[in-house]
Amino acid sequence: MRSKLFALFLAITVPLSLVGCNGDETAGDPSSPDAVEAPAEQPTADAPPTGGDIPETAETPSDVSEWFSYEPPDGRYEIKFPNEPLEQNQSIPVSETEEIQLSLATYEDTNQGRAYMSGANPIPLPEGASFDVDQGLDGGRDNAAASTNSDIESEESINVEGLPGRTIVMRNPEGVRFKLMMLADSDNAVLYQLLVAAQDGNINFPEADIFFDSFNLSQS
Protein backbone atom coordinates (compact mmCIF):
# COMPACT_ATOMS: atom_id res chain seq x y z
CA MET A 1 0.00 0.00 0.00
CA ARG A 2 2.66 2.49 1.05
CA SER A 3 5.04 2.07 -1.89
CA LYS A 4 2.20 1.64 -4.39
CA LEU A 5 0.48 4.94 -3.67
CA PHE A 6 3.81 6.70 -3.31
CA ALA A 7 4.99 5.48 -6.72
CA LEU A 8 1.67 6.46 -8.28
CA PHE A 9 2.13 9.98 -6.99
CA LEU A 10 5.66 10.22 -8.39
CA ALA A 11 4.22 9.28 -11.77
CA ILE A 12 1.85 12.27 -11.72
CA THR A 13 4.61 14.76 -12.64
CA VAL A 14 3.56 16.42 -15.88
CA PRO A 15 5.77 15.62 -18.89
CA LEU A 16 6.77 18.92 -20.42
CA SER A 17 5.80 17.73 -23.89
CA LEU A 18 2.14 17.70 -22.79
CA VAL A 19 2.08 21.35 -21.75
CA GLY A 20 0.99 23.74 -24.47
CA CYS A 21 2.18 27.15 -25.50
CA ASN A 22 1.19 29.83 -27.97
CA GLY A 23 3.37 31.82 -30.28
CA ASP A 24 5.57 29.03 -31.65
CA GLU A 25 4.11 26.60 -34.17
CA THR A 26 6.80 24.00 -33.48
CA ALA A 27 6.45 23.99 -29.70
CA GLY A 28 3.71 21.36 -29.61
CA ASP A 29 5.07 19.19 -32.40
CA PRO A 30 7.30 16.42 -31.01
CA SER A 31 8.66 15.73 -34.50
CA SER A 32 10.13 19.21 -34.77
CA PRO A 33 13.84 19.56 -33.95
CA ASP A 34 13.00 22.80 -32.13
CA ALA A 35 10.34 21.27 -29.91
CA VAL A 36 10.90 21.15 -26.17
CA GLU A 37 11.82 17.60 -25.23
CA ALA A 38 10.36 15.80 -22.25
CA PRO A 39 12.60 13.81 -19.92
CA ALA A 40 13.65 10.51 -21.45
CA GLU A 41 12.18 8.55 -18.55
CA GLN A 42 9.19 9.16 -16.31
CA PRO A 43 8.49 7.36 -13.03
CA THR A 44 6.11 4.45 -13.35
CA ALA A 45 3.58 3.05 -10.92
CA ASP A 46 5.87 0.08 -10.23
CA ALA A 47 8.99 2.14 -9.59
CA PRO A 48 10.17 2.33 -5.97
CA PRO A 49 10.50 5.78 -4.38
CA THR A 50 13.93 7.39 -4.42
CA GLY A 51 15.59 10.30 -2.69
CA GLY A 52 14.78 9.52 0.93
CA ASP A 53 12.76 7.48 3.38
CA ILE A 54 9.00 7.76 3.52
CA PRO A 55 7.95 9.42 6.79
CA GLU A 56 6.49 7.09 9.37
CA THR A 57 2.72 7.29 9.64
CA ALA A 58 1.42 9.19 12.63
CA GLU A 59 -2.11 9.80 13.80
CA THR A 60 -3.65 12.62 11.75
CA PRO A 61 -4.13 15.60 14.08
CA SER A 62 -7.78 16.62 14.51
CA ASP A 63 -6.73 20.25 15.01
CA VAL A 64 -5.52 21.83 11.76
CA SER A 65 -3.21 24.10 13.75
CA GLU A 66 -1.17 20.97 14.49
CA TRP A 67 -0.72 20.16 10.80
CA PHE A 68 2.69 20.62 9.16
CA SER A 69 3.08 23.86 7.18
CA TYR A 70 5.09 23.10 4.05
CA GLU A 71 6.82 25.48 1.66
CA PRO A 72 8.85 24.18 -1.32
CA PRO A 73 12.47 25.25 -1.87
CA ASP A 74 11.45 27.85 -4.46
CA GLY A 75 8.94 29.39 -2.03
CA ARG A 76 6.15 29.54 -4.61
CA TYR A 77 3.38 28.42 -2.29
CA GLU A 78 2.43 27.22 1.18
CA ILE A 79 0.21 24.29 2.13
CA LYS A 80 -0.57 22.16 5.18
CA PHE A 81 -0.03 18.38 5.40
CA PRO A 82 -1.32 16.14 8.21
CA ASN A 83 2.34 15.46 9.09
CA GLU A 84 5.75 16.30 7.64
CA PRO A 85 5.89 15.21 3.99
CA LEU A 86 8.76 13.67 2.10
CA GLU A 87 10.26 16.11 -0.39
CA GLN A 88 11.42 14.82 -3.78
CA ASN A 89 13.64 17.21 -5.75
CA GLN A 90 14.48 16.42 -9.36
CA SER A 91 16.54 18.12 -12.06
CA ILE A 92 14.78 17.56 -15.38
CA PRO A 93 16.66 18.27 -18.64
CA VAL A 94 14.51 20.11 -21.19
CA SER A 95 17.21 20.74 -23.79
CA GLU A 96 20.92 20.15 -24.27
CA THR A 97 21.74 23.28 -22.27
CA GLU A 98 18.75 23.80 -19.98
CA GLU A 99 17.18 21.99 -17.06
CA ILE A 100 14.46 22.83 -14.56
CA GLN A 101 14.07 21.95 -10.90
CA LEU A 102 10.94 20.07 -9.87
CA SER A 103 9.93 19.57 -6.25
CA LEU A 104 7.17 17.26 -5.05
CA ALA A 105 6.00 16.85 -1.46
CA THR A 106 4.20 13.63 -0.53
CA TYR A 107 2.75 12.30 2.70
CA GLU A 108 1.13 8.88 3.04
CA ASP A 109 -1.16 7.97 5.93
CA THR A 110 -1.02 4.17 5.83
CA ASN A 111 -3.35 3.84 8.82
CA GLN A 112 -6.15 5.52 6.87
CA GLY A 113 -5.08 4.34 3.40
CA ARG A 114 -4.74 7.92 2.19
CA ALA A 115 -2.03 10.01 0.59
CA TYR A 116 -1.41 13.68 -0.18
CA MET A 117 0.83 15.40 -2.74
CA SER A 118 1.70 18.94 -3.78
CA GLY A 119 3.97 20.21 -6.53
CA ALA A 120 4.67 23.10 -8.87
CA ASN A 121 5.93 22.50 -12.41
CA PRO A 122 7.71 25.44 -14.08
CA ILE A 123 7.10 25.24 -17.81
CA PRO A 124 10.02 26.16 -20.12
CA LEU A 125 8.71 28.07 -23.14
CA PRO A 126 10.36 28.82 -26.47
CA GLU A 127 11.32 32.46 -26.93
CA GLY A 128 8.28 34.56 -27.77
CA ALA A 129 5.80 31.87 -26.74
CA SER A 130 3.12 32.13 -24.07
CA PHE A 131 1.64 29.47 -21.80
CA ASP A 132 -1.57 28.00 -23.22
CA VAL A 133 -3.69 27.47 -20.10
CA ASP A 134 -6.29 25.09 -21.52
CA GLN A 135 -3.73 22.96 -23.32
CA GLY A 136 -1.56 22.84 -20.21
CA LEU A 137 -4.46 21.76 -18.01
CA ASP A 138 -5.57 19.19 -20.60
CA GLY A 139 -2.04 17.79 -20.72
CA GLY A 140 -1.76 17.60 -16.94
CA ARG A 141 -5.12 15.83 -16.70
CA ASP A 142 -4.34 13.32 -19.44
CA ASN A 143 -0.92 12.52 -18.03
CA ALA A 144 -2.26 12.06 -14.51
CA ALA A 145 -4.89 9.63 -15.76
CA ALA A 146 -2.42 7.71 -17.93
CA SER A 147 0.29 7.58 -15.25
CA THR A 148 -2.06 6.12 -12.65
CA ASN A 149 -3.98 3.95 -15.17
CA SER A 150 -7.16 5.75 -14.12
CA ASP A 151 -10.47 6.67 -15.70
CA ILE A 152 -11.68 10.23 -15.29
CA GLU A 153 -14.97 10.32 -13.40
CA SER A 154 -15.56 14.07 -13.27
CA GLU A 155 -13.92 17.38 -14.17
CA GLU A 156 -14.82 20.89 -13.01
CA SER A 157 -13.38 24.30 -13.86
CA ILE A 158 -12.25 26.32 -10.84
CA ASN A 159 -10.50 29.59 -10.02
CA VAL A 160 -8.27 29.84 -6.95
CA GLU A 161 -6.48 33.06 -5.99
CA GLY A 162 -7.09 34.34 -9.49
CA LEU A 163 -5.60 31.28 -11.20
CA PRO A 164 -7.76 29.19 -13.57
CA GLY A 165 -7.71 25.47 -12.99
CA ARG A 166 -9.52 22.16 -12.81
CA THR A 167 -10.68 19.74 -10.14
CA ILE A 168 -10.56 16.19 -11.49
CA VAL A 169 -11.68 12.94 -9.89
CA MET A 170 -10.15 9.68 -11.17
CA ARG A 171 -10.34 5.98 -10.30
CA ASN A 172 -7.90 3.20 -11.18
CA PRO A 173 -8.75 -0.52 -11.67
CA GLU A 174 -7.76 -1.32 -8.07
CA GLY A 175 -10.47 1.05 -6.79
CA VAL A 176 -8.07 3.78 -5.63
CA ARG A 177 -9.64 7.18 -6.26
CA PHE A 178 -7.74 10.41 -6.75
CA LYS A 179 -8.82 14.02 -6.48
CA LEU A 180 -6.49 16.29 -8.45
CA MET A 181 -6.55 20.08 -8.31
CA MET A 182 -4.48 21.85 -10.97
CA LEU A 183 -3.92 25.60 -11.22
CA ALA A 184 -2.27 27.36 -14.16
CA ASP A 185 -0.18 30.48 -13.61
CA SER A 186 0.20 31.77 -17.17
CA ASP A 187 2.17 34.87 -16.15
CA ASN A 188 4.96 32.79 -14.60
CA ALA A 189 4.42 29.61 -16.69
CA VAL A 190 3.84 27.34 -13.69
CA LEU A 191 1.38 24.47 -13.26
CA TYR A 192 0.46 23.73 -9.63
CA GLN A 193 -0.77 20.25 -8.71
CA LEU A 194 -2.45 19.17 -5.47
CA LEU A 195 -3.59 15.59 -5.10
CA VAL A 196 -5.23 13.30 -2.55
CA ALA A 197 -5.79 9.56 -2.92
CA ALA A 198 -7.93 7.12 -0.98
CA GLN A 199 -7.40 3.37 -1.03
CA ASP A 200 -11.06 2.73 -0.16
CA GLY A 201 -12.31 5.10 -2.89
CA ASN A 202 -13.73 7.68 -0.48
CA ILE A 203 -12.06 10.99 -1.36
CA ASN A 204 -14.70 13.14 0.37
CA PHE A 205 -13.07 13.07 3.80
CA PRO A 206 -12.62 16.25 5.90
CA GLU A 207 -8.82 16.13 5.84
CA ALA A 208 -8.86 16.36 2.04
CA ASP A 209 -10.80 19.63 2.24
CA ILE A 210 -8.38 20.96 4.85
CA PHE A 211 -5.45 20.10 2.59
CA PHE A 212 -6.86 21.78 -0.52
CA ASP A 213 -8.18 24.81 1.36
CA SER A 214 -4.80 25.44 3.03
CA PHE A 215 -3.07 26.14 -0.30
CA ASN A 216 -1.80 29.71 -0.59
CA LEU A 217 0.38 31.37 -3.17
CA SER A 218 3.40 33.12 -1.70
CA GLN A 219 3.52 36.86 -2.20
CA SER A 220 6.38 37.97 -4.48
Image (cartoon, grey):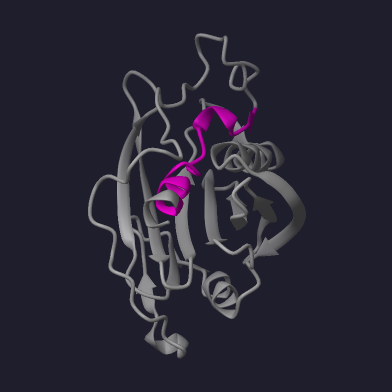
Q: Residue 95, relative to residue 208: is it above or below? A: above
Q: Nearer the viewer, residue 216 or 171?
A: 171
- Residue 218 placement (x, y as % from top left): 45, 66
Q: Quadrant of the C terminus?
A: bottom left
Q: Quadrant of the N terminus?
A: bottom left
Q: Residue furthest left?
A: 52
Q: Residue 139, relative to residue 159: is it above or below? A: above
Instruction: Say whether residue 130 is left or right of residue 118.
Output: right
- Residue 12 placement (x, y as % from top left): 50, 44
Q: Can see residue 16?
A: yes
Q: Is residue 67 magenta?
A: no
- x 60%, y 39%: residue: 149
- Residue 137 placement (x, y as % from top left): 65, 43
- Residue 192 placement (x, y as % from top left): 53, 53
Q: Residue 206, relative to residue 117: is it above or below? A: below
Q: Is residue 17 magenta?
A: yes
Q: What is the tally of numbered marks visible in this picture? A: 0
- x 52%, y 47%: residue: 188
Q: Residue 121, relative to residue 40: is it above or below? A: below
- Quadrant location of residue 148? top right
Q: Can see residue 125?
A: no
- Quadrant location of residue 196? bottom right
Q: Which residues are magenta?
A: 5-22
- x 76%, y 54%: residue: 154
